[in-house]
Image: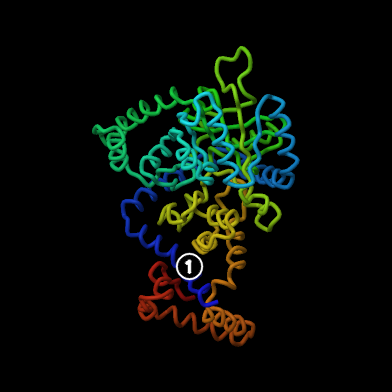
Amino acid sequence: MASTTATEAATLNSFNTRARQALRDERLRDAVARSTDLLGSRRVEALSELANADELRDAAAAIRSASVSRLRSLLDEWSDNFTALGGTVHWARDAAEATGAIAEIVAASPAGPGAVVAKGKSMASEEIHLNEVLASAGADVIETDLGEFIIQLAGEAPSHIIAPALHKDRFQIADLFTADSGQAVSAEIHEEAAYARDRLRRAFLDAGVGITGVNFAVASTGSICLVENEGNGRMCSSLPSVHVAIMGMERIVADLAELDVMLNLLARSATGQALTVYTNLITGPRRDGEADGPENLHVVVLDGGRSAALHSQYSSALSCIRCGACLNVCPVYRQVGGHVYESVYSGPIGAVLTPILRPDDPSARELPEASSLCGACTEACPVQIPLHDLLLKLRLERAPESATATRRWGFRLWSLAWSLPLVRHISRVLTRLGLRCTRVLRRLPSRGWPGAWNKCRDLPRAR
């Protein structure tokens, strides 16, 4: 028991250690704050342009809740329709099955195991560490989303769900592009864009296999929908002869009318756009007489712990549409960025999803503690996931293993005292008196949680 306690204590300190390192990086904090401020303000402006924003959110929440509640039947309907169109579905229980299936598809492609793989943005592919698996099998995997390309060069994971490289400034990006090209690339944005455009265009033309994510699948038509702003997803899904799409099993709607509601909210919540620049609806592989599109279309449907969540008290987390709005308003994420979470999913939704999908990982179980429980994430969520409630439930679930004896007895005594009206009244009087002694309270110990609490908060005025 003692060794387990020590391990848990080390785990509890790990997020704090990473957070302290991030807080010392002023360059990181400036970049994250600037980006999240911009995304957050654009979201507010975009939603304010809608006369029925609240009704649309209510409809989206109902759609996602219904989709999750009848997920199996929707997946079966979609799979039957998709297969009838000529596509191939691969069901993957975990990362190993998903990456194994994709590696086999790449190896069997006309380009062979050493194929150039042009890869669009896909959080599910990050979740299963696909790039490492394909690279070890000999494939040349090139991320074609600009943000993903930048972090691939940096050897890093995404820092944000929709803006993977928001923690990098243009000078850091210039250094990465210079190292990649072997020639100096200026920190001027137009020159960086020109380099990336030329570099990635070659990848599109050379690619034997294209890999993308899936924003939504449409059960009634057997379609998959990709939304993007750069056109790279369209290139990855239309130029190579083989297209592989990776889909978390929950990313499905019943029909095109439901898809319309989701698309109206997704871009507004993510980037403040009315609609993304490219909305790609793919319904089967290339047909006779069509000029582009893959000859072979595969979709890998990933479970990866989602089935277990489906039948738990955390099932509402599967409604997430990956807009990233909760990250942009989270006071924790905005200070430390995404890498401190050590998960492809960061911020409030990551603090919920990661321990659900990785229940046996001690480092994942600590993430629900990385929250102020202010509720801003729940307010921002376009599909009304009760994120702060889920965070509280996850904290409660692991409370017996994480709480020290001192903390347990402290809360027991507090609960007992406040159950007595007289003691509660006396404590409130003493609290008001104490708050008036601001100069004294400001001198709380500088070490431990009392000092940490006092350092980061303004004490309220006594009334």
Rendered view: 147 above or below 369: above
Rendered view: 355 above or below 404: above
Between residues 326 and 76, which one lies in front from this camera angle?
A: 76
For image coordinates 68% across by 31% down, the residue present is 256
The percent coordinates of residue 331 (x first, y second) are: 45, 57
Position of 137 with respect to 447 (left or right) is right
For image coordinates 43% across by 47% down, the residue present is 157
Between residues 94 and 15, which one lies in front from this camera angle?
A: 94
The image quadrant where one finds the N terminus is bottom right
For image coordinates 61% across by 48% down, the residue present is 304
Residue that label 1 marks = 12
Q: Name which quarter of the figure residue 283 lies in.
A: top right
Tally the numbered discs: 1
Q: Identify the image's colour scheme: rainbow, by chain, secondary structure or one colour.
A: rainbow
Q: Residues within 10 Å of mark 1 (few under 14, many from 20)?
A: some
In this view, which residue lies farthest toward the top?
Answer: 289
Judging from the image, what secondary structure is the residue with disc 1 in?
helix
The percent coordinates of residue 430 (x first, y second) are: 49, 84
Q: Name which quarter of the figure residue 88 lies in.
A: top right
The percent coordinates of residue 11 (x first, y second) are: 48, 66
In this view, which residue lies farthest toward the left?
Answer: 184
Amino acid at dot 1: Leu
For image coordinates 54% across by 36% down, the residue present is 103
The percent coordinates of residue 5 (x first, y second) are: 52, 74
